[in-house]
Image (cartoon, coloured by chain):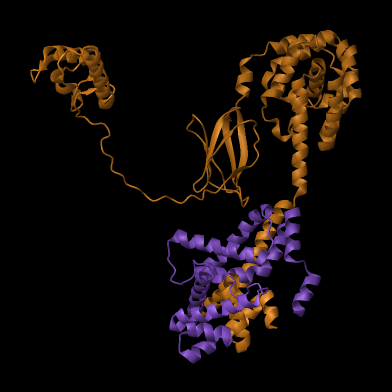
Chain colours: A orange, B purple
Amino acid sequence: MAKNKKHTPPSTDLLRRYVAGTLSPMEQHQLEKAALQNQQIDDTLEGLQALKAANLDENAALEDLNQRLRQRVRKSERKFLPYYYASAAAVVLTVGLSWWLIQKEGVPEADSVTSAIAVEKERPALKPESAPVPIVSQPPRLNAPMTASRKPSLSKPSAASQIRESTDAEKVQQAEPPVPNLALEEKENEIVVPPTVPEAAQTQDAQQLVAAKPKMFIQSRVAAPAPVQSTQDLDTVRLVSTKTKQATQVINGAVAALPQGRAKKENVFVLKGKVLDAVTKEPLPGVTLTPQGRSQGATTDVEGKFVLSNVQKNDQISVSFIGFQTVQMTVKDSLVAPILLQQDNRELSEVVITGYGKNKPTNREAIPKNGQKSYENYLKTLAAAFIAQNPQTPQGRVVLQFLVNPSGELSDFENKNKANLVLFEEAMRMVKSGDAWNPPLKNGQPEVGKVRLVIRFE
Amino acid sequence: MFLKLFRRKTTLTDTEYLSEYRRTGDLTSLGELYERHMDMVFAVCFKYLRDDEEAKDAVMQVFEQLISDLKTHEVQNFKSWLHSVARNYCLMQLRQKRVTVGDEGIFENEAYENFVAEPPEKEDWELDNQLSDLGDCLQILAQEQRRSVELFYFQQLCYQQIAEQTGFAINKVKSYLQNGKRNLKLCMEGKQNG
């Protein structure tokens, strides 16, 4: 038994019995020995003893803890649960993306315009139903029909883009079956008609259309998924489109004449999103969102949601909340993924009060530009060179005094120790041709300074 | 003993739970595993923090830490690893609060190094030497430490009995033992190294 104990650490139950005092002395000894060797046991034991000493009910605390733990686990489970949300989001995303791609590629322009007219005439109420979420004024979607209509020469799409359209079209059908089907039917109906309709009538329609610019244009964009229902449909549409070429060209002209400024205006959109705690994934209310360079921002509501108007693509928005790290994000789309904020665990640092002395002396002696040291070296080497060149001159030292005026000029050289004139002349020459001097400063102002140098010619 | 066997068969072992969690990231399995050891974690946290609400919060915080740490760490002995995680967390809390705890030995680990569980394969003469060294070293120890060590390790008494026999306070016995053990170890190492 004793040997066994050494290898299998005592269970917490055993420790509890120890604390309760129901163990035999031998068992107590074994346990104490184990505790002396193993800090985990020791800590647990001391904790249990402390609990007993504090007269706390361990079971109640553990019960509470169990509940909290389960809650915690369940909370994150809930997060994993709604797969259908995720899948719905994925479908919407793919649809939106593929649609956008198609529009960007430049769907055969005649098709989109004709079908747009078709839907427009028959069902003006189509918009709200068929609009997938991201429809709110997306610049690319606006531009696509416009640019397409500006180059009518490109009337046939490439084989590749046809294939893409057909696959994408399937996705569209999956995602939103009811409405596009309607649109499809109507389009078919309409398509049969055009050849027999007099061209004049078509043109008139088109003109009316253009007259109703803003509203209608959005609707025609809404109807855009219709042409990509299937390749077959595409073919029929294209067939028709050649027949109604004249009419469409009139429309094209009209559309091209649309004021260009509107495209710019459409770039401004409304940004909606959500802010969550990065760890707990809980919504954060009261988070401030500030677009850079503007004063008006937004804050999140109780559910962590925000709506930020007047946003443009590539705007910088800073997301900040007390106790969390501030995030900078760049706007790419009117829809953003939930913004996750990391908790800021920094402690408030202690306040350090530092007294700063003035780091620039306002008073200063006159000094050589490159410093005292290099100047001394310069004088030494020159003096030595002079002696070497003129061995016959008597050696000695020169005490040279001169003035440095505020602009750094040197004047009033004096031979203070009445040294040999040759040496004095040489010393003067050395100083004059040496480093320039900085004038002395008094209260930051340069003034005249007196300098005394001792130069040894030895 | 039986309980242990029974458990192993019906439920997963710690290691199985761990690999399960690392594979799936499923919090339920981690939660079940944690529930097993929560009494230990709670006791440890209470030992350091001395407040049941704080200890409870600490237990939950340690769990949060596990969620992230266990994804990256390979843990061999979960229980002792968990203990050190909990202990470090509590010490960090205390450090942040700048509270000094009067309990001696909290910050020293050496007292817990294996002293008794020496590798047994020693030559006889070596053992003899060690035993005589031990005798010498015991004489060096302070009176209280020597008595505690003798009664505890030689006569295998428990703290309670030692306290009764010697009249020492029961919590003093423990610190005498810890310090005596450490001094003995230092003394023995000194002798062995000359």
Q: What residue is rendered at 65% in x and 72% in y? A: B119
Q: What residue is rendered at 59% in x and 27% in y? A: A312
- Furthest residue in direction front, as rendered: A392
Q: What residue is rendered at 7% in x and 18% in y? A: A418
Residue A361's spot in the image, x, y percent?
23, 31
Would you say A433 lies left or right of A159 here? left
Would you say A198 lies left or right of B1 here? right
Nearer to the camera, A187 or A66: A66
Would you say A232 lies left or right of A328 here? right
The N terminus of chain B lies in quadrant: bottom right
- Can the viewer see residue A132 in this picture? yes
Residue A89's spot in the image, x, y percent?
74, 41
Nearer to the camera, A18 or A456: A456
- Can the viewer see residue A8 in this picture? no
Nearer to the camera, A51 or A407: A407
- Furthest residue in direction bottom, as rendered: B165
Residue A313's spot in the image, x, y percent?
61, 27
Instruction: Count the labels in the image.
Output: 0
Res A332 quadrant in image: top right
Q: What residue is rendered at 66% in x and 62% in y? A: A71
